[in-house]
Image: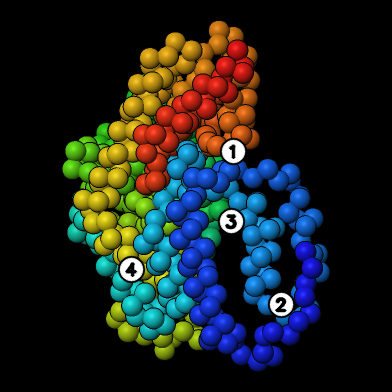
Amino acid sequence: MKQSPRNAIPEFGDIPPDVLRKHLHEVADWIADYRENISTRRISPTAKAGAILKALPASPPEDPDPLDGIFADFEKFLLPGVVHWAHPQFMGYFGSTTTGPGILAEMIAAALNVNAMTWRTSPVATELETVVLDWLRQWLKLPNEFSGVVYDTASISTMHALAVAREEASTSVRTLGLSGRSELPIFRIYVSDQAHSSIDKAAIALGLGEHNVRKIASDSEFRMNMAALRDAVVADLRHGFKPLAVVATVGTTSTGSVDPVTEIAAICAQYQMWLHIDAAYGGGLAVLPECDWVTQGWSAADSLVINPHKMLFVPFDFSALYVSDIQRLRRVFTLVPEYLRGDAAGAEINYMDYGVQLGRRFRALKAWMVFRTFGRIGLAARIRDHLRLAQIFAGWIRDDALFELSAPVVMGVVCFRFRCPDDAESDRKNAKIVETINAGGEAYLMQTKLRGRVVMRLGLGNLLTTEQHLQNVWKIIREAADSQS
Ligand SMILES: Cc1ncc(COP(=O)(O)O)c(C=O)c1O
């Protein structure tokens, strides 16, 4: 890539308004074309590791460069390195939640570029956040006393929830910390063996120690086993540990399984443990009236995280943490630096008080635009279709003697395996099939491990995916499996 020394950009100020307008129109057309023709692209790049790095100049640009050239380089050097998550045959992770209204909102938010540290730094960013969080709370059927805050990811949401649990169980960690305090017990956190690694990371960050995150065995349907949970808590108490919290997962990463939240809540109440619900993915099901079961037990939680960027079509990133009394979170994190005193003096909400982060993006705008464009009915219809597609796919697996389902299909996630009598051979072949499919560029799946065995995993969540796309992917899977037999 060559940098041009042409001086098309003024030495002071921004690019001229007419140049901006021209490029905005071009980018708008580019985005519209990208969305319209996305299914004609390869999903995964062919680039070898380091190739993009090599193609880009190592030294920073000295002279100004016209945008035409920069955009041409974007297409030539950068675009080939993109994994096209929004492709309708991308079925990795939980699918992609790209939508037209989400893209429009992100463009507007980029133009406004406000920093929502405090209410005063942009009142609408704070108040719209309060509004969309309360809309979502109503959809989740969380009681009125729950209110929330938006962070980037579920990992950060869970870390904040557990920080409050830690403070309430020990007091003064905020001021005195943990180190050198022999009077403090060793805290324990309980999760199922299917829980997400973000809980271990939270324990690392909070000084609780990853060894103190106890993995409770899951049952045949990958849900936390209640007898095993009770036994672990009782054993820990006997050995002088302090049971701190249980994290129940609603929609586990590998299979979409749902822990028995009501029973877990009863155990938390009995042993005075914090109940955090990780509904990062599965919480979205709550917008479907027929999936009311998914919210059972939630009202007894101390905190709950949901990522509308996983199922509810809000673009990445948008994670909502709800706490049964949000002041509990505020008590741990409020701290007003001197230079913001004037900004944060009133009775209004200042979201910087509810976490580590000070500067905050105007994330509420995209949720507001997506929620309004589709309405609950539209969101539910699209999710319902993904559940339908998941069941169709599961049916094809059941009807094919070469494959087997590896877990119940609860949400838009299907785990399955190419049958093979020998375990080691089966692991190798299933991993190879996923690798072959992803390298082919026409479909994208994941592999995961269940009970120590490699399985393939398909995630549906893209509103561009149709039954035809699913059939195409099924054909690609069978062809890749054929090449292994
Ligand atoms: C159940 C669950 N919880 C938490 C996370 C972490 O999400 P994030 O990337 O938003 O931190 C994931 C990620 O896939 C997940 O599946």
Q: Which of 166 and 72 is in front in this view?
A: 72
Label 2, label 1: how far apart the Cα atoms are: 33 Å
Which element type, helix, strand or loop, lies under badge 2? loop
For marks 1 and 4, the one nearer the N-term is 4
**Labels 4, 3: front one:** 4
For marks 4 and 2, the one nearer the N-term is 2
Tell me the kind of residue under disc 3. Answer: Ser
- Residue 199 is at least partly visible in this image: no
Tell me the kind of residue under disc 4. Answer: Glu
Say which mark, if any, is on residue 129: 4
Give coordinates of residue 192: x percent, y percent.
43, 33
Residue that label 2 marks: 65
Which element type, helix, strand or loop, lies under badge 1? loop
Give coordinates of residue 248: x percent, y percent.
36, 39
> Is residue 115 rendered to the left or right of residue 51?
left
For marks 3 and 2, the one nearer the N-term is 2
Q: In which quarter of the image is residue 160?
A: bottom left
Q: Which of 400 and 358 is in front in this view?
A: 400
